[in-house]
Structure formats: C-alpha cells, structure tokens
Amino acid sequence: MKNAVITIARQYGSGGKTIAAMLAKDLGINCYGREILKMASEESGINERLFGMSDEKLKHSVLMKLLKRPYEGDLIPPESSGFVSDDNLFNYQAKVIKELAESESCVIVGRCADYVLRDFPNVISVFIHADREFCLEQAMERNSMSLKEMQRFIEKTDKYRGDFYKYYTGHEWSDARNYDLCLNSGKLGFKKCVEEIKAYMKVRFED
C-alpha cells in the first residue's frame, strides 16, 4: 500500500492530539488538525475566518443537537446561496481530507475524518479516551481554570464533539463500533498508545 492514513478522534484531556503528533513524528509523516481549515479555505476561495466562525456557531446551535445531516460528499457551487453555509464549509473540509488520504500518508485529528474516509481501504480509525480524573488532570496542566471551570469545560467540549459528529455522520461519537481501535491513554500512557497504533498498522497493512 503506497500510503496509510490514521484518523484520531479523542476526548478532551485524553492526550489524543499529543498522541497524534507523536505518531506522526515517529512515522515521519504530517499531522493535520485545524490546518485543514486553512487548506479548505484555499480550496474553496472562502475566507478562512468563516470556517472558524462556523465551528463557534455550531457549538451554540440548538438545531445541531436535534438534526442529523450525514455528509454525502456533494459540494454546493459558488453561485448558490448556500455556498458559505456551515454544511458546505464542512463539505470542503471533507474534500481536503479525501485529497490528503489519496495523496500522502498522514495523521488527521478530528473533523469526522474516520467517517469521511470510511470507504478508504488505507485508513485506520482510532478513538483515544481516558477516565474523567485523568482527562481533568491533563487539562489542568495546560489551562488556567479552576477545577470546577475545567470540569464544565471538558463536559461542554466533549458534548459539542459528540453533537458535531452525530450531526455530520448520524452516528454516536463515542461508539466503539465506529473505530478500528479504542485506546485508554490513562492506562497505557501516550507512548504506548503510539506503539499500539503502530503495531496495528503492521498487522493491518502487512503484505
């Protein structure tokens, strides 16, 4: 197989982003997260700021919690009134994700990449999770909030990630059936999570 892609979904504070970066460094490949917003902006010609604003708007959207609009791959043309809609902004991010999967080995964090790439044979999907205490401890090391503020922030962030995932995929974000691997970073530690993913890659892509 000419290239392999690893998608990382993660609970806040589980270290998924750190694990993704460590894995990419070990494999000598790129790691993409919010960089996809910039790439989607360049692809579409839509101001990058609108992609960031869409993320923030969806965090407070009641409709996203009630509706589901699973991604189907269609792009809305520039002449359409829906060209800069939240759904079309996601469609362009998905387009970038597919182009990356076709062109290079890489690690992709978030953005429902596991669902977008569900039909790609060269993709391994991973969900990183940990118990509440571990996530809280890790998050407190990186943020200047009180304990209660951080607890609420973690709950709110994971709720948003779950709502976002369900809106664009129709599936539950934390359902293990969506992923090839589910790893508890609180029990394994970051380095061993990386080793587990690499070991799975070896078995999965062994000729």
Image: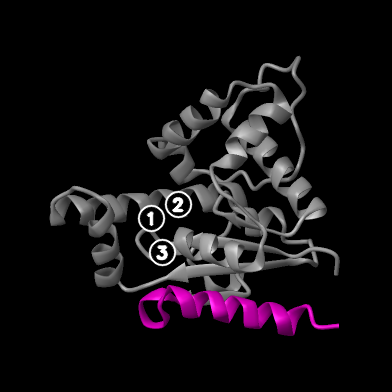
| Disc 1 to disc 2: CB gap under 8 Å | yes
CA separation, marks 3 and 2?
15 Å
User: Which residue is label 3 attached to?
Assistant: 15
The chief SS type of the magenta part is helix
At x 40% / y 37%, what residue is drawn?
Answer: 62
- Which is nearer the N-term, disc 3 or disc 2? 3
User: Which residue is label 1 attached to?
Assistant: 158
Mark 1 Cα within 10 Å, few/some/many (few <14, many 20+)?
some
Q: Is residue 142 left or right of residue 6?
A: left
User: Which residue is label 2 attached to?
Assistant: 161
* Residue 110 locus on image (x, y percent): 54, 53
* Magenta residues, start to end: 184-207
* Residue 58 locus on image (x, y percent): 45, 36
* Residue 138 locus on image (x, y percent): 29, 63
* Element carrying mark 2: helix
* Element carrying mark 3: loop
Q: Amino acid at mark 1?
A: Asp
Report the front residue among 154 and 178: 154
Is label 1 or label 3 in front? 3
At x 42% / y 70%, what residue is drawn?
Answer: 129
Q: Amino acid at mark 3?
A: Gly
Q: Amino acid at mark 2?
A: Arg
Is label 3 or label 2 in front? 3
Quadrant in which the C terminus appears: bottom right
- Which is nearer the N-term, disc 1 or disc 3? 3
Label of residue 51 in the image? none
Quadrant in which the N terminus appears: bottom right
Q: Is residue 163 visible?
A: yes
* Residue 24 locus on image (x, y percent): 60, 62
